[in-house]
Amino acid sequence: MGLAQEIKKEGIMLVNKPVGVTSHDIVDVVRKKLSMKTVGHAGTLDPLAEGLLIILVGKATKLFASFASFDKEYIGILKLGEITTTGDSQGPVVKQGDYRDIPRERIDEAFSKFSGEIDQIPPMVSALRVKGRRLYSLARKGITIERKPRKITIHALTIRTIDLPFIEFYVHCSKGTYVRKLAEDIGEALGCGAHMTKIKRVSIGPFKLENAVSLDAIDEKHLQSFARTSQV
């Protein structure tokens, strides 16, 4: 492989991750299609989640910290009346609550509580490390440990549609925000519980989902130059 070809294979690629695959699966696809080993991603999306995933190639993998600091935007759908072990529809329901008589005003009030700088307790099903162990690895063993709340910022949180028990919403949030936990906290505020049924990431900092390529379209031509991305 010539030097010119090596230099060309550096930069980032915006990928529209579908539901049902892991972020690591996308990395593997890029490695194979670009014949590169040095490939990573700038922020995990779980299998349930879809949307914008930034792939780092070559020397761009050193830019991970820069991307991690960006705000993010999501479109999500939560379901009232059910609490699951995972905070989403992939986990079994462990508790149910009645949502049928909750008026729109109470829903609006509950959403308004989660605006600006707030404290959020990371969920057990997260990749956060506590004493060197991933929380999700403990959760899989049925172990729950105390987690300290962390400061996050919700820049915008708006309701898009309501078709009970489902509420579709948009959120613009700081790094470190767990959308699943946000849904659970809204459900708790309403007294009926809630979990996520859909999560779509639509932006990471200045990078938008509308500019991302599909999994089938991943190709070297979609790499953005390293020189450009090194300015983030």
Image (spheres, helix red, strand yellow):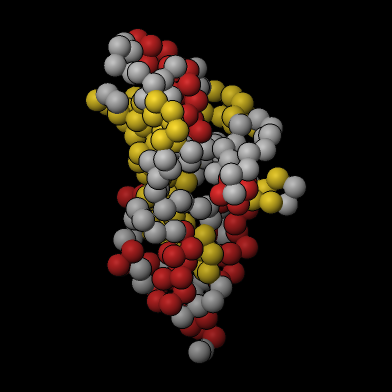
Q: Residue at x 27, y 24 (%)?
A: 164
Q: Residue at x 50, y 78 (%)?
A: 36
Q: Quadrant of the rendered structure where residue 123 is?
A: top right
Q: Quadrant of the rendered structure where residue 130 is?
A: top right
Q: Looking at the image, which is closer to me, 162 or 184?
A: 184
Q: Is residue 177 visible?
A: yes
On screen, 112 above or below 12?
above
As drawn, the residue found furthest toward the left would be 163
Q: Is residue 206 left or right of residue 80?
A: right
Q: Position of residue 48 (x, y in %)?
A: 39, 48
Q: Position of residue 208 (x, y in %)?
A: 39, 48
Q: Quadrant of the rendered structure where residue 171 is?
A: top left
As drawn, the residue found furthest toward the right would be 131
Q: Position of residue 204 (x, y in %)?
A: 47, 46
On screen, 148 above or below 51?
above
On screen, 4 above or below 162?
below
Q: Is residue 145 left or right of residue 109?
A: right
Q: Residue at x 29, y 16 (%)?
A: 100
Q: Is residue 60 left or right of residue 212?
A: right
Q: Residue at x 47, y 66 (%)?
A: 27
Q: Is residue 194 visible?
A: no
Q: Looking at the image, which is closer to me, 37 or 211?
A: 37
Q: Looking at the image, which is closer to me, 55 or 189?
A: 189
On screen, 160 above or below 206?
above
